[in-house]
Image (cartoon, rainbow, N blue to C red):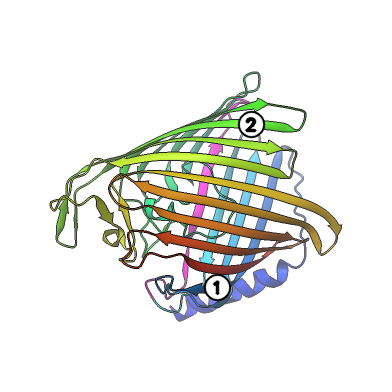
């Protein structure tokens, strides 16, 4: 264990210094491409009564990311690996390192791709934020990379984008993550996901994209805190709209409805996430509608040490069928230079189901060194 820690620390130090200098990898093999990238995050966190999360106010390094993508003719591999510094206390109070994604792909035509391995579900939109404890986190769909097989179709004459993945099991747990999905959902298996997007051209530099998605997963029987849960399923439907104005402005809206068909022996309408290794204060309603609105605007600059400034905001909410609403707002200022990206994020969160429901806040600053 000690040798592993020394090796990982050595690797982080090497990555830190090499990330300050760009490396151009070239190959003489025709139709073969290879790209490597890595980055290191440092983290500053400030919060008020946020359920006292086991996270240090300052963490350097917080996370190292190693990415690789290579392609030869119509086959390739896309992979990334995460290494996390130990948290001060809790289940992750040791080095954790795992595959974030790793999949092989084959392009039988210019419009079709087949993927096998660990990859994204592609269920809905992703907010341009580094903060991982979003409203989708208790639902297990915040950043869900799982092992499966998938088909992608990107039309040319008719610009339809279609995603059809299948996953046998949800990967990892909160204690032993195989991927960066700390909420393993609810242990589902036989997961089917379908997503369809269609873009509409509104002007020379303006585009509107409509997205539709569906999700079905089978849930086994559970026993959580002396409560028995029957087997069932989780079904979700999603519709989203994204408006792209030029290259620097994006606005989007998303609505998702989900429902668990499982039944609790005490007739509870909320599923405790503590049964899946998460903190006791997290639970998810058996049926709810979630929605969000967000916007992103970037101003390009011509300075060497400041190439762009961006402002993003996301407002989201969970509206349970039985229970009170949960709200969250994330305001993000993003600064970009040649090899350094900085996020300054102000998160506000309010859960009306808590005894003392009020707006809590969380300020985080993330500095990323990239190559």
Q: Quadrant of residue 236?
A: top left
Location of the C terminus by quadrant is bottom right
Residue 186: percent from the left, percent from the top? 31, 51
Q: Are marks 2 and 1 in contact (CB under 8 Å)?
A: no
Q: Residue furthest top?
A: 157
- Going by the image, does 121 lie left or right of 207? left
Could one spot residue 156 in this view of the protein?
yes
User: Is residue 47 one of those drawn in magenta?
Assistant: no
Specify the segment rendered in magenta: 90-112
- Residue 208, numbered circle: 2
- Going by the image, does 266 lie left or right of 336? left
Q: From the viewer's side, name the closer residue of 213 and 239.
A: 239
Residue 264: percent from the left, percent from the top? 17, 50
Location of the N terminus by quadrant is bottom left
User: Is residue 97 one of those drawn in magenta?
Assistant: yes
Question: Is label 2 in a helix, a strand or a loop?
Answer: strand
Residue drawn at 46 percent across, 64 percent down: 359
Instruction: Tell me which label, 2 or 1, sits earlier in the chain.
Output: 1
- Residue 21, numbered circle: none
The crowd level at tag 1 (other Cα within 10 Å; few <14, some 14-19, many 20+) is some
Residue 327: percent from the left, percent from the top? 45, 55
Residue drawn at 46 percent across, 61 percent down: 349
- Residue 45, numbered circle: 1
């Amino acid at each position: 264990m000690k040798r592993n820690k020394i090796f990982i620390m050595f690797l982080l130090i090497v990555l830190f210094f090499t990330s300050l200098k760009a490396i151009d990898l070239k190959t003489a093999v025709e139709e073969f491409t290879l790209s490597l990238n890595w980055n290191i995050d440092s983290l500053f966190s400030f919060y008020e009564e946020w359920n006292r999360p086991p996270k240090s106010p300052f963490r350097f390094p917080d996370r190292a990311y190693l990415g690789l993508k290579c392609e030869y003719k119509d086959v390739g591999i896309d992979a990334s690996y995460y290494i996390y510094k130990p948290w001060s206390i809790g289940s992750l109070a040791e080095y954790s390192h795992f595959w974030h994604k790793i999949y092989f792909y084959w392009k039988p035509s210019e419009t079709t791709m087949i993927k096998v391995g660990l990859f994204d579900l592609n269920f809905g939109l992703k907010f341009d934020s580094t903060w991982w404890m979003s409203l989708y986190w208790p639902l297990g769909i915040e950043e869900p990379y799982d092992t499966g097989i998938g088909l992608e179709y990107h039309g040319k004459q008719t610009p339809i984008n279609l995603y059809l993945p299948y996953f046998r099991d949800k990967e990892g747990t909160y204690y032993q993550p195989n991927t960066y999905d700390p909420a393993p959902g609810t242990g589902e298996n036989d997961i089917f996901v379908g997503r369809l997007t269609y873009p509409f051209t509104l002007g020379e530099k303006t585009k509107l994209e409509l997205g539709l998605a569906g999700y079905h997963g089978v849930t086994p029987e559970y026993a959580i805190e002396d409560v028995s849960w029957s087997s069932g399923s989780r079904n979700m439907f999603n519709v989203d709209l994204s408006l792209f104005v030029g290259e620097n402005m994006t606005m989007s809206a998303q609505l998702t409805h989900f429902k668990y068909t499982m039944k609790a022996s005490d007739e509870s309408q909320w599923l405790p996430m503590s049964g899946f290794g998460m903190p006791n204060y997290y639970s998810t309603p058996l049926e709810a509608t979630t929605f969000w609105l967000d916007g992103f605007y970037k101003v390009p600059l011509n300075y060497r040490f400041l190439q762009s400034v961006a402002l993003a905001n996301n407002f989201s909410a969970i509206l349970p069928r039985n229970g009170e609403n949960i709200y969250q707002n994330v305001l993000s200022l993003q600064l970009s230079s040649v090899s350094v990206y900085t996020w300054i994020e102000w998160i506000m969160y309010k859960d009306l189901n808590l005894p003392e429901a009020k707006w809590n806040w969380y300020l985080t600053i993330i500095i990323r060194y990239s190559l």
